[in-house]
Image (tube, rainbow, N blue to C red):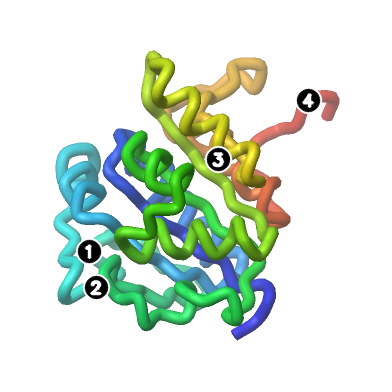
Amino acid sequence: MAATDLVLAMTGASGAPYGVRLLEVLLRAGRTVHLTISPAAVEVLQLELDRTVRLDQFDAADLLGDRAPGPGNLVYHHHRDFRAGIASGSFLTGGMVVCPCSSGTAAAIAHGLSENLIHRAADVHLKERRKLVLVPRETPLGLVQLRNLTACAEAGAVVLPASPAFYTRPKSVSHMIDFVVGRVCDQLGVEHHLFERWGE
């Protein structure tokens, strides 16, 4: 356990490639990543990346494919395991990101429901005043979603929509994914070279 450990939660919003790429980048940066995945995220992973992830018999290869996980350390936690360290404020981390973040997850975080480990870990990061980054991809946003995201921001979360930039002149979808992932890494204090910054 160290204050440089990071928590990554993947939930059931479209945008699974963002979450998987973020995991790759964090592991390649040598970070210990505590990963938890919702059942809805499993369905999205199958739909968008054709990857079958088993929550009860998790295998990192099912999620990352044939890509080497990097020098970091991946620690998986079942979304129902409230005994996991990340469910407690005494477990030190360097921050948490929910990527992608579904509207339902944002609502649960906004109202402190803690119905699963993802909600509870996010609640812990807010109450301990640690970095919490939410990456929603829903569009358009209705009043309910806007109010929930506002409540999260007011509680201390960073709302970072999955909005790629075009001033970087992206040449592929992967370049657009890397821009969003890089912006998340900026919030978490993880060094990267995923895109050319404005002014460089």
Disc assigned to residue 152: 3
Q: Position of residue 126 (x, y in %)?
A: 60, 56
Q: Name the N-terminal-most of marks 2 and 4.
A: 2
Asked if marks 1 and 3 touch (Cβ < 8 Å), the reply is no
Asked if marks 3 and 4 touch (Cβ < 8 Å), the reply is no
Q: Name the N-terminal-most of marks 1 and 4.
A: 1
| Residue displayed at 55% across by 40% down | 152
Q: Name the N-terminal-most of marks 3 and 4.
A: 3
Asked if marks 2 and 1 touch (Cβ < 8 Å), the reply is yes
Q: Is residue 89 left or right of residue 103?
A: right
| For residue 6, above or below residue 134 | below
At label 3, the amino acid type is Cys
Q: Which residue is mark 4?
A: 198
Q: Is residue 32 left or right of residue 39?
A: right
Give the distance between the C-alpha atoms of the residues marked 2 and 4, in whole angstroms: 38 Å
Q: Which residue is mark 1?
A: 62
